[in-house]
Image: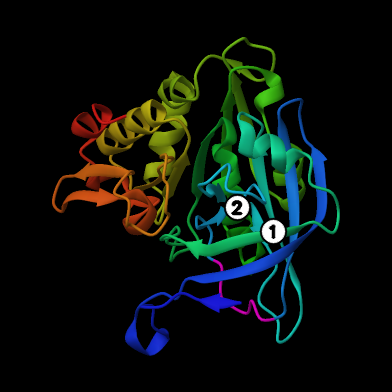
Amino acid sequence: MVVCPGEQDRRSGKRAIHQFTSQVVGNVPVTSSVRRLDLLLPPSASFEILPGQFFMIRTGMTLWPLLRRPFSILSSDPPGHGKKRRVSILFRVVGQGTRLMAEWQRGQSVDMIGPLGRGYTLPESSGTVLMLAGGLGIASLFGLAESILLKQGAPLVWVCIGGKTGEEILMKSELEEMGAEVEVTTEDGSMGMHGLLTQWLERLDTQMRMAALTKSPGLAVYACGPFEMLARVAAITRMLPLPCQVSLEARMACGVGACLGCAVKTRQRGYQMVCKAGPVFDAREIDWEATCRLF
């Protein structure tokens, strides 16, 4: 395992970036276009992995595809002393890189960098947690729900998953088995509420429940999904008002803030890189109007 030059240890307050080789122990279809990849990290990978962080993965063994691909960390085992541990990701097969990944067999070696980025800040109190996942956005939120529900005296974790069709609703049964309360919206009405996830937020009965929830101390909102969805969620939570953290999905070539390809506009700090300053931001921090023009 290689620790990238220029990064320091915990004493300096800076985050180390690790490059290492993992091994495929599972690669199974979840839907017709989405697969779950399970990887075994080497014993030397004793670093902490926070919910909301991501890995940059080399998908080909040649120079093409040249660039690594970013993938949210679905779940991970806690670090163990000298023991191998498992991490999992979800990926949609959309291009050459992910088509290569879909062919990986058990025992395949995988070149990875991470964990990268800033993850979610866990709620400090035992109040209700509301999560809004658009499509594959559940890959980022699943580990957060798992972390909160595993805590002793876990609060109510209320997850709403939205998709175009029922096939796009991922990890519903796994979340329910962990103890989360799960609701679903689909654009074609094939599962759950007919409509958009943001319309679920705006529904009258939801608003009534939200009004009750806003009176509960420590209510926290988390969201991940398409940019337009997050912009609307940010507007609704700002109006209520509720604290909201969002994980932004952006194209990125390096994952460490060098290529400047994933910039978003913030209200106070100017342009920030999603890979380095995020992918998780306070929803109030993003200049949504200016950033929408960038995507």
Q: Is residue 193 above or below residue 267?
A: above
| Tag shown at residue 58 | 2
Mark 1, other Cα within 10 Å: few <14 / some 14–19 / many ≥20? many
Which quadrant of the figure contains the C terminus? top left
Q: Position of residue 219 (x, y in %)?
A: 42, 51
Q: CA distance from mark 2 to mark 1?
A: 7 Å
Which quadrant of the figure contains the N terminus? bottom right
Residue 198 or residue 47, whichever sits in front = 47
Give the amino acid type for the residue marked by disc 1 in the picture: Val
* Residue 46 forms part of the magenta stretch: yes
Residue 42 or residue 164, whichever sits in front = 42
Q: Position of residue 273 (x, y in %)?
A: 30, 51
Which region shows up in magenta?
A: 44-49
Give the residue drawn at x 61%, y 28%.
Answer: 94
Q: Is residue 34 above or below residue 213?
A: above
Q: Earlier in the sequence, mark 2 or mark 1?
A: 2
* Residue 263 forms part of the magenta stretch: no
Q: Is residue 260 above or below residue 80?
A: above
Asked if disc 2 and disc 1 are in contact, CB closer than 8 Å, the reply is: yes
Question: Is residue 264 rendered to the left or right of residue 177?
Answer: left
Q: Is residue 277 above or below residue 236?
A: below
Q: Which residue lies most toward the top here? A: 188
Question: For residue 81, which quarter of the picture?
Answer: bottom right
Name the magenta segment's main secondary structure.
loop
Which structural element holds mark 2? Answer: loop
Question: Is residue 198 rendered to the left or right of residue 175?
Answer: left
Q: Position of residue 14 (x, y in %)?
A: 35, 77
